[in-house]
Amino acid sequence: MRAFFLGCCLLGLQITTFGQWIPTNGPYGGGVMLLSAYGNDLYTATNDKMYLSTDTGSNWSCISSGLPDVLNRIMTMVRLDTFLFIGTQDMDGLVFRAGTGTYQWTIMQNGLHIHDFPTSMEIFGGDIYLATIYGVYRSENAGELWNSMNTGLAGITCLVLQAHDDRLYAGTDQGSIFYLDDPVVGWLPFNTAPLPSNCDIFCLCFRDSLLFAGTSKGVFRTADGGCSWDTCNTGLTYTYVVNMAWDSMYLYATGGWDGVFRSADNGNNWEPVNTGLPYRPVNTIDREYN
């Protein structure tokens, strides 16, 4: 069974491909900021806590040991081997790491600067990459040391990192996308045809030969490697798209107060899919396979 999970205002919800939204058994008490599925492990970050479910949301356990009592704005999360990482834009912008056996969190700031404020993390080539509002960093030793990876990105804020095939892609706050093949060479421009210059790129979604960009101006699509872009907003009642996902039938988009939308024709037309969804501000959508 394929299931999609949403991060909403106060709780997590799940949907099978042909069903409606049903609530999971928690977590409750705060906005769900992030969701990530790794095998049978489903992680969620609320405003200030971390939770783990190993049974597709039927039960949740708090895994916040070692995190500050006052912690807000957990913005990004990724798992590398036996470690789970989170980045927060509170507490001067800190990165924390926990082993998946104990889930005891420690700060991993060696090489980072105060007020870097993480925006995205991704695994590429066996290393962990961290995007912040002041640049991109790479760690070759599971967060023990971070090194700057800004060649080709000078003065540009990266909002999202996305690995696909043998490349790492970076979406920025200037409507531009860069890619990394080789850390020695650095970042290279991807899209020769730019997106609107004042559009923030919040997510990148690859589906077959297409690349979709979820932005502050809606959804854009390229079929020719960024040489041209189509605007794909027909049917969307908001144009602030922060997260996208897809299955064999539909493309999904979310990020606004109107909930979740899906497209059966690769973004040409969108329709709302909110039956059973009591809270429409949806922050994130993730999928899990059994």
Image (cartoon, helix red, strand yellow):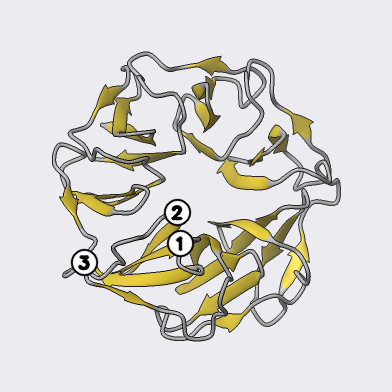
> Could you say where residue 174 lies in the image, as x and y percent from the top left?
78, 52
Front-lying residue, 97 or 1: 97
Q: Residue at x 31, y 76 (%)?
A: 106
Residue 44 in view here = yes
Q: Which residue position is annotated with label 1?
A: 88
Q: Which residue position is annotated with label 3?
A: 65
CB contact under 8 Å: marks 2 and 1:
yes
Front-lying residue, 96 or 83: 96
Q: Earlier in the sequence, mark 1 or mark 3?
A: 3
Q: Residues within 10 Å of mark 3 (few under 14, many from 20)?
A: some
Q: Residue at x 59, y 66 (%)?
A: 132
Q: Which image quarter holds the C terminus?
A: top left
Considering only vertical position in the picture, is 105 above or below 64?
Answer: below
Mark sitting on residue 290:
none
> Could you say where residue 139 lies in the image, as x and y percent from the top left?
49, 80
CB contact under 8 Å: marks 3 and 2:
no
Q: Earlier in the sequence, mark 3 or mark 2?
A: 3
Q: Which residue position is annotated with label 2?
A: 73
- Secondary structure of residue under mark 1: strand
